Amino acid sequence: MPAFPVSRPRRLRRTEALRRLVRETRLAPDQLVLPLFVRSGHGVRQNVESMPGVAQTSVDELLRDAERAAKAQVGGVLLFGIPDAKDAIGSSAWDEQGPVQQAVRALKRALPELVVITDVCMCEYTDHGHCGVLRDGTVDNDATLELLAREALSHAQAGADVVAPSDMMDGRVRAIRRELDTQGCPDTAILSYAAKYASVFYGPFRDAAESTPREGDRRGYQMDPANAEEAIREVQLDIDEGADMVMVKPAGPYLDVIARVKRTFNAPLAAYQVSGEFAMIHSAAQRGWLDLDRAMMESLLAIRRAGADMIITYFAVDAAERLH
Ligand code: PBG
């Protein structure tokens, strides 16, 4: 490259049209996925205090949010369920009449084109709040696989396009793929939360999903934030077990992991901009310390630039509407 004064990078930054012409990364509405929290009842809309604009809703209200998302042309919705009853093994997770199963059926009836993804995990359904069944105080990996497979199958039978296991048990992608294939759902895709870190940034979500562990934490199954090489091994295992898409989570503090995974694998890659990332931007904006819209768009663009093909974000609809 010639040196200055021949090279003047500012030439291509002179006008908005030139900047647009050479822009390397673009954001589109269909790359954004909106998480939704569903519970039983009718006309229910309970706002989540630490997540402005996010609510737990009943199915009828969820349909209104999903309609707005579809109109903004977002790429899909990701459903989390808050059941009426919890027990030690989370048996409400595969209840055909559970909130997620009902929401999936209602969405597929009302908005058949909208991609419906369901979160598959036990933590919202167990009374102790861990992501699987407990034995001697720790989560029993192999005993949990069967429960996850049952939960995933019930979501698939309700009509989910994609099931997304977020529990971080070893072997769960294989167990779910096998269950789906032998029970008549070979076309349901799996988006695996492959590199999911034990992160403080899930704090606001646990209020939203009512899934805080009663005792202990998730460091015995979610990844150590210090590790990036391990993310490569995790993603490799999940792809080998049959994951159609993989995810890195959280997103903003783990851009290096997103970039590495993207460079190493060619599977579609999702990144989850989690509740704490969303809450931080909102709280700074509320104090007048950051411009909300610009912080939202820049945070999402950065995640795309790092290599994510799609982003799961509570900003999905607001960002998509800004992109039109
Ligand atoms: C369930 C699950 C969690 C999130 C997504 N799925 C919470 C957790 O693992 O504690 C976090 C999402 C967010 O913070 O926005 N296991």
Image: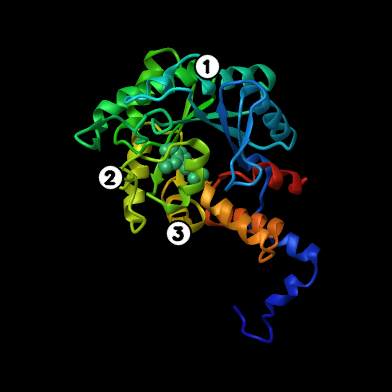
Question: Does residue 270 show up?
Answer: no
Give the residue type at disc 1. Answer: Ala
The answer to whether the residue bearing label 2 lies less than 8 angstroms from the nearest atom of ligand 1 is no
Residues under numbered marks 1 and 3 in contact, where contact means CB atoms less than 8 Å apart = no
Number of numbered labels in the structure image: 3
Quadrant of the image occupied by residue 186 = top left
Q: Name the residue under label 1.
A: 158
Question: Does residue 211 show up?
Answer: yes
> Considering only vertical position in the picture, is 33 above or below 98?
below
Q: Name the residue under label 2.
A: 220
Can you say which quadrant of the picture contains the C terminus? top right
Q: Name the residue under label 3.
A: 256
Q: Which of 44 and 247 is in front in this view?
A: 44
**Residue 261: numbered disc:** none
Q: Nearer the viewer, residue 273 or 307?
A: 273
Can you say which quadrant of the picture contains the N terminus? bottom right
